[in-house]
Image (cartoon, rainbow, N blue to C red):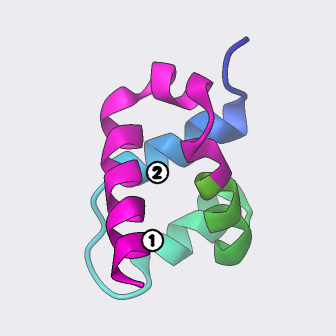
């Protein structure tokens, strides 16, 4: 089973680089129609999904490392 369109769009958004304050949040609202809080909830769940890892291993592994680093800092 493959990722849905929304899940693929979330990973695609994470691959992009954003400059300027609020640019990413604006893209989340405009392109995905999601509130940033909901976006990050979905993204966090997606990082634990093996289908996401198979779809985009570079992005998922990078985000997993960032997440683990932040957890270790707490």
Residue 5 shown in magenta? no
Residue 74 to residue 10: above or below = below
Position of the C terminus by quadrant = bottom left
Callouts 1 and 2 close, C-beta under 8 Å = yes
Q: Is residue 62 left or right of residue 41?
A: left
Residue 6 to residue 37: above or below = above
Residue at 73% x, 65% y: name it.
34
Residue at 53% x, 76% y: name it.
25
- In the picture of the structure, the residue carrying the numbered disc 1 is 24
**Dominant secondary structure (helix, strand or loop) of the stretch shown in magenta:** helix
Residue 64, given in percent of the width and then of the height, sits at 40, 50
Q: Is residue 27 left or right of residue 66?
A: right
Q: CA distance from mark 1 to mark 2?
A: 8 Å
Residue at 35% x, 40% y: name it.
61
| Badge 2 density bin: few <14, some 14–19, many ≥20, Cα 10 Å | some
- In the picture of the structure, the residue carrying the numbered disc 2 is 13
User: How many discs appear?
Assistant: 2
Residue 8, given in percent of the width and then of the height, sits at 58, 34
Residue at 48% x, 19% y: name it.
54
Element carrying mark 2:
helix
| Badge 1 density bin: few <14, some 14–19, many ≥20, Cα 10 Å | some
Quick one: 16 or 67, which is closer to the camera?
67
- Stretch in magenta: 45-74
Residue 67, given in percent of the width and then of the height, sits at 42, 62
Residue 66 shown in magenta? yes
Asked whether the viewer can see residue 35, the reply is no
């Amino acid at each position: 089973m493959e990722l849905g369109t929304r899940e693929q769009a979330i990973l695609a958004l994470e691959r992009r680089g954003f400059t300027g304050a609020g640019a990413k949040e604006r893209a989340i609202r405009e392109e995905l129609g999601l509130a940033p809080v909901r976006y990050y909830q979905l993204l966090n769940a997606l990082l634990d999904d093996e289908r996401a890892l198979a779809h985009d291993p570079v992005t998922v592994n990078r985000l997993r490392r960032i997440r683990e680093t932040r957890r270790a800092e707490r």
